[in-house]
Image (tube, grey):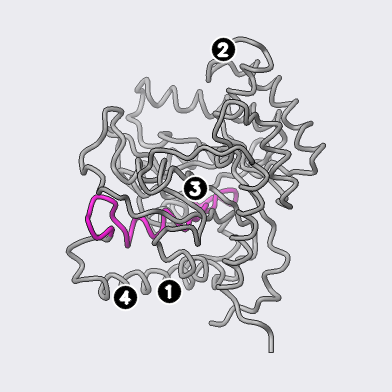
Amino acid sequence: MPIQKSSLQAIPTCFASCSIGSKPSHTLPKKLEAIAAAGFDAIELSFPDILTFASEQLKRDVQPSDYDDLCSVGQEIKRLCESKKLKILILQPFGNFEGWPADSDERKNAFDRAKGWIRIMEAVGTDMLQVGSSDSQGINMSRDYIASDLRELADLLAQHGFKLAYENWCWSTHAPTWKDAWDVVQKVNKPNIGLCLDTFQTAGSEWADPTEDSGLIEGAGGKDALDKKLKLSLEELSAMVPHNKIFFLQISDAYKPVKPLDKDTDQSGLRPRGRWSHDYRPMPFNGGYLPVVDVTKAVLNTGFRGWFSIETFDGGADGKGKEYDDMNEVARNAMTDYRKLLDQCSVLNP
């Protein structure tokens, strides 16, 4: 259906703190300055940025489980954001949480981490935790078991008035597609759990494959058949998912790698789509090849007009990284590309 441009004017905008900065001198305060100056309303606060900022502030290495230190520094991050009139939309990325065997050390660690991150959420003043669908091996992939873990996490968050935004990571071992994540959310069946949808994760799981010369999923009958399959999936998304169960939409594209990625996991156990996600994700209209506009339209056709968040990891088409000096320019360009995306998704009112 046509999307009226006037309906998109009040969409709030967000920028992930992990998606800007390429040098040690690009500190969190400087990131916040650039994001605010470009006109964004909020940030996704990345846990690694908290760790780095804490180590800088306290002048010693701060560990991921040093929650007292992280909460103390979190209060300073809250003040910095308030001074820039930036909301902290979410704390991210909380991964490898669900599915661990009962009574296992991994499960205990997952819930200990959750309780620590909830403390940080209180300190920084955010009410939403982003949880990515696990890519761990050795988990129980029963959908009911997965939902049970996430239901318990949702209940922990609810005690503080917090929400859980569940995202399909396209390299996940159990929920790589939006439909998988939506099925999990429905099974959890709690008012404070919803979806984090992502243009990259959606197209990257159902249409693209960075290990192929074509950059596309092979064996689907060719590009036309693949396009048709994605179109049907996106129509289902628009029809099936209530707009109020989409907590926010992340925006990025992807490069087709200059050299196809190896199909095997790397030394850290990361699957090829995971490596692709970490290093090959520019803004739309900057050399990528995913059908970002189509995915965005599908989300808008649910009636969603909530948070749009920039989450990019632009290491170039070779994935080797890009260095730049001017974060202000990066943030301004991202805002320009975001507005272009809305323009391409909409029609002018008659």
> What type is the residue that disc 4 sits on?
Lys
> Would you name the residue on which mark 3 appears?
166
> What type is the residue that disc 3 sits on?
Tyr
Alpha-carbon distance for marks 2 and 4? Answer: 51 Å
Q: Is residue 264 left or right of residue 169?
A: left
Mark 2: which secondary structure? loop
Dot 4 crowding, Cα within 10 Å, few <14, some 14–19, many 20+: few
Q: Which mark is residue 66?
A: none
> Would you name the residue on which mark 4 appears?
228
For residue 157, say whether it is visible.
no
For residue 123, say whether it is visible.
yes
Mark 1: which secondary structure? helix
Range of magenta residues: 189-215
Alpha-carbon distance for marks 3 and 4? Answer: 27 Å
Dot 2 crowding, Cα within 10 Å, few <14, some 14–19, many 20+: few
Residue 157: where, in percent of width, then height? 60, 37
Residue 208: where, in percent of width, then height? 31, 59
> Would you name the residue on which mark 2 appears?
61
Mark 3: which secondary structure? strand
Q: Quadrant of residue 126?
A: top right
Q: Is residue 295 left or right of residue 44?
A: left
| Number of the front mark, 1 or 2 | 2
> Would you name the residue on which mark 1 appears?
235
Residue at horizontal 47 percent and vertical 41 percent from the top: 150
